[in-house]
Image: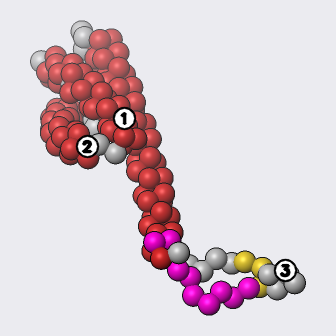
Amino acid sequence: MHDTNLLQLIIDDFAPAQDLLELLQSESLALHGRDMPLLEDILARKQALIVQLEQRGRKRSEILTSLNLPTNRQGLEQLASQSSVGEQLLSQSDFLTDLIAQCQAANVKNGQSIIMQQAATSNQLKILNGGEPPALYDASGTFSKLQKPRALSQA
């Protein structure tokens, strides 16, 4: 009984996990295009899917805990060894784990994209606002101290 409930919870997570992966891929394109309205929409949908996946994950953990099994792969293997649907339970769990790993990889990639865009924007703002004085050397090879850096808009 618990094994079939657990299997159904795993299978029920396929659709939201796949939707999350597609959203993360769309988010990557929206980040590169800096499409803020689309990013806001993606964020809202992404958060709803994550909450849904977390709730089902807790239910799966509760099932394993109620059977006095560890809430990890080892606990799942112990349950599968005593179940008529054990092979399917493990294979579907592996599929879901792979799908979630793809989501995590896409999320890391999007995070790196955000960090690079923030650095580029910061650098552009520094240039426009005058930023730090450039470190230059004059013709004699000594460090040149410029009077006062001027913003690009004032040059």
- Identify the residue at horizontal 24%, vertical 26% (top origin): 19
Checking the image for residue 139, the label placed there is 3
Q: Quadrant of residue 51?
A: top left
Is label 2 in contact with label 1 (beta carbons under 8 Å)? Answer: no
Task: Give the camera-side residue of 145 and 59.
Answer: 145
Amino acid carrying label 3: it is: Ala
- Above or below residue 132? Residue 73 is above
Q: Which residues are magenta?
A: 144-153
- Above or below residue 148? Residue 48 is above
Please identify the quadrant where the N terminus is shown: top left
Image-based side of 150 in relation to 55, left or right: right
Image-based side of 18 in relation to 32, left or right: left
Checking the image for residue 29, the label placed there is 1
Asked whether residue 86 is drawn in magenta, I would say no
- Above or below residue 16? Residue 44 is below
Residue that lies at the very extreme toward the top in this rendered image: 84
